Structures are given as C-alpha cells and as structure tokens.
Amino acid sequence: NIERIDLVCEVNNTDHHTLQNSADRLIVRRGLPFTITLHLRPGTHFQNGDNINFIAQTGPIPSVEAQTKAKFSLSRFISRSSWSATAEMSDSTVSLTVCSHPNAPIGVYKLILDQGEAIGLGEFVLLFNPWCKQDPVYLASEAEREEYVLSQDGLIYRGIPNRITVLPWTFGQFEPGILDICLQILDESPNYISDAALDCSERRNPVYVTRVLSAMINSLGDKGVLVGNWSDDYEDGVKPTVWKDSCSILRQWSNDGCRAVRYGQCWVFAAVACTVSRALGIPCRVVTNYGSARDSNGDLVMERFYNEFDENIADDSIWNFHVWVENWMTRPDLSLGYEGWQASDPTPQHRSEGVFCCGPVPVRAIKEGELTFKYDVPFVYAEVNADVVEYIKLRDGRVFKMGGSTTEVGKSISTKAVGRDEREDITHNYKYPEGSEEERRVYEKANHHNKLAQAGEEPGLHIKIKVTPDMQIGSDFDVYAELKNNTMVTKSCRVMFYAQAVSYNGKLGETCGLGVILVPCRSWVCQKWARTWWQI
C-alpha cells in the first residue's frame, strides 16, 4: 500500500555532511539517524503497533553472523548503539527514522521493509562517521573534521629541509563518481576476490580498510591504481610531476577497466590515498618526512658502504623526502594510548605480510620505539629515526668506519596546518628532540643489537663538508672540506672530492668536478686540522 518512497536525500545528506557528494542519492554516515518518508495510497492505515520489521544488508552474501545483514523492528526510541527505527504517522504519510550501528560495515546497502512480504525501500551508501563518538574514526575537533574529512584541496610538501617547496593538490573526494570509484577499489582488492563475504564484514573496521587501501593504491601484486616509476622514462605514461589532482587518476583507472595508471611517485600515491580515505569518511592528512631512510635489511641502521672510488656498494638509501598519509582512528587491537594518528604508506617499498603495503602504524608507537605493534612499526621507525653509519671497504677487504650521524634522518616532518595554507611541523609527534636523553632511550629500546654498527676499524679521521650560507641554486658556490685527526699519529690524507646530482629518492646522477688532492696533516698532537675549498 505504499504509493511512493522519498529518501529525502538533500535533507539527509546535509545532516550527514555528504551533500557535496549528491543531492539525489542517499549517502549517510554510521551511527547517525536519517529519515525516509513513505507516501501511502488513499485509504491505507498504518498502526505503530503493527508488526513491522526492517532488513539492512550489504555485500553479495549478506549474513547476520558476519554483520553484513541487520534485522530490526520499530521501536519507541532510536538507539545509537544498534540498528533501530522509529515511525511518525500522519493521514497519508509515514516518516521513518533509521539509525545504523556505529560499527556497521561501510558500503552500499539495501533497506527492506518486511511485513511478511519484502518491500524494497531503496539503496543508500554508508560511510565512516567522524562526527559519531561511538565510531572508531571519531574526531572531536570540528576544525579538524573540516580539514581532514571535508576539505577537497590541500598542500603537499617536497624539496629539502632548508628549501621546502609546496605543491597545491586537489583531492576532490566529493567530485561526481569518485565515491563509487573508491568503493570499486575495495571490490577489486585480492581480499574481496578471494572471500567477498569476509571482506565486506571486515569493512566495519577502519584499520582493515586503511590497510587494504595501502595495498590497492599501488599496483604491485593486485589491480591497484598507480604504477610507480623512478626511472626518468615516462614515455608510455604521465610524468609524476604533471599530476595535480586525484580525480583524473581515479577516473582513468576506473574507465580503463581497473588498469593501473602510469605513473606515480610517493606524493602521488599519498595524495590518492588521502582522497579515497576522506571519501570513505576516514580523517586523513598527507605527511612529508625529510631525510627519509629506506632500511633494506630491517636493522634500524643506514649502512653506507663505499669502495676506494667512493662508489656506494650498499642497498640502503636516504630519500631527500618521502610522503605518506596519516589516518585518524582508535586501535582496539592494541594497548590503550595508541589511538589517534596512524601512518600508512601506499608507496610500494616493502612487503608486509606478503603484500606491498605499509601500516596503519600508530604514530605514538614510532615515537616510543614499540616495534612489536601492528603494523610495520620497524620500517616506519627507521624512516624517521635510523642512525647512519658510513664505511669504506678497501681492495684488500679491510673495512674502515668513516663516520656517521644520529641526526641526518627524519627532519622537518610536515603537513598542512588546519584551516590555513601554512606548513605545520609535526616532527615532535614521531620522535623526541634529536640528541635528547629521551630520543636515545627510545632508540636503545628499539635497538636490534646491530653488529654492523660495531664492525670495522676506527681510523680516527673525520671529514665534514660545508657550503657557504648564501649559496644560491643555479649559481657558483664555495664548498669547504674540513678534516679532523683525532689520533696521536700524524697522517697525510688523499682526498677525493666531487659533486653528484641526487633525485628526491636518493638516486645518484653523474659525477662532476672530480678532484684528488694530497693533504698533509701536521701541527697539533691530538687535534690537527686541514681546510681546503673548491668552487663548483
């Protein structure tokens, strides 16, 4: 006896902060009521005590046990902790108020009225809800919700710490069709393909969804969105520096039958991940780490091995910068105190549980050196806090420790400030101040008992390279090499000096300005200096 069903999309979507998606399609958030109006045929009477039941279901194999199917009846009051519904009646209409469980799986739902005969009331999309205190992605600050969920534009930081550059980026999470593409990404994941019922059930958990997105934004091992390319050869695709928005990438991926888009680098992967996260309702921000270590063997130390010609013969590298995302959520799978921002990296750098993904990692776990927590804490810890040790390996096999640094890695960790087009430095979230007792305590706590850090003979000779403070890119500048002899023995030094261009991910270019000089070290017994300079 229902003549017409009105999903009241514009009003509901306004209340649920999804009107930017659409005014014609019902898109709601978990744990927040929405209204549906039933227009009855003339002469139909609706009694509040009637035996009226509802079914809300999602996925290809809805199941009550898997929480992808919910059965509930009319009640006097709306419950914010379970699926529930109330009704208000007039002469010819029934206004239904429905509220979802705050931990229901996200996705496309069918709502069914069950009076012995099933009547479809329509479809709606259910998203995570940062406005709902019972939702694990709840974010208390309205200003932060505006920035990390609703804002469609942002800034991404690149460059080097003393010359940070800004890239404006359009995330476009509310652009037409983007939400459907984001849901399509979940449906194309290996998890869904291998067990759709289980995957849809797990979509109630933002930790799970974030981990799936980390794998699906890159294309290694699955039908992911982007192909990475650091070769400088982009003839069969788009150079990563050309991209300025996420929507064109996502639409190309979807329109081409889920064929990976060529090409991306770290900031592109992160920007697309931010778009998808915000579209699904998970608060997200893009983060840049300067001096980002890529620890190839998981020992928390960046070992640089050089031969006598100063050629790097190790796999470890330090990127000028690296970009990932942070997502806001609770972590009920971990100890209390590790909720909040979780780092997640969609750039395919290493395998996690056999898959090219990384995270989500509690940022606090990184700061405290809790390497046993899920997921991938050691890898991200090394990116921001690894020590650097340098060795030279001679032709006769001897290894000398040349020096190192405890401050080279993890600088000026940056994100866009809330509500302002300014950079916010969040290094303090990831690590204690460099050189502080707390920082060394955490490093020792995380220490892997690395043996390589103690290997090799100590030559007692140290070299430091300096440039003039007024150095300008594109102009000549002076470079100084400062040698220090900490031994009791007079030494003469053969110094090989040259410059190399370096890409942001640590890849070295060709050598220029090669010079070899002999520096006689004489003068003081315990502290002898040699100072020379070159003009590049």
Image: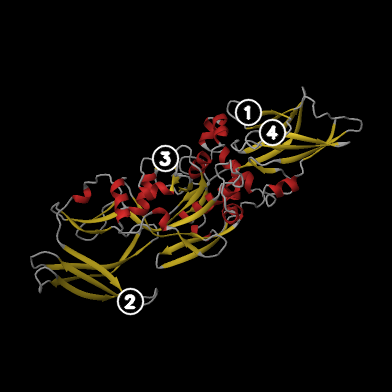
Cα separation, mark 3 vs mark 4, equals 34 Å
Cα separation, mark 4 vs mark 2, equals 71 Å
Q: At numbered mark 3, what does the secondary structure look like: helix, strand or loop?
A: loop
Residue 141 numbered tag: none
State the residue in front, 88 or 536: 88
Label 4 sits on residue: 84
Mark 2 Cα within 10 Å, few/some/many (few <14, many 20+)? some
Cα separation, mark 1 vs mark 3, equals 29 Å
> From what the image shows, is residue 481 above or below residue 446?
below
The quadrant in which the N terminus is found is top right
Which mark is first along the chain, 3 or 1? 1
Q: At numbered mark 4, what does the secondary structure look like: helix, strand or loop?
A: strand
Instruction: Please name the amino acid that badge 4 sits on.
Output: Ser
In the rendered structure, the answer to whether residue 419 lies left or right of residue 472 reads right
In the rendered structure, the answer to whether residue 153 lies left or right of residue 381 reads right
Label 3 sits on residue: 374
Residue at the image position 57 percent from the left and 33 percent from the top:
200
Camera-side mark, 4 or 1:
4
Q: Position of residue 355 (x, y in %)?
A: 43, 39
Cα separation, mark 2 vs mark 3, equals 47 Å
Camera-side mark, 2 or 1:
1
Label 1 sits on residue: 62
Cα separation, mark 2 vs mark 1, equals 68 Å
Using the rendered view, name the quadrant where residue 69 is placed. top right
Camera-side mark, 1 or 3:
3
Instruction: Please name the amino acid that badge 3 sits on.
Output: Lys
Q: Are marks 4 and 2 in contact (CB under 8 Å)?
A: no
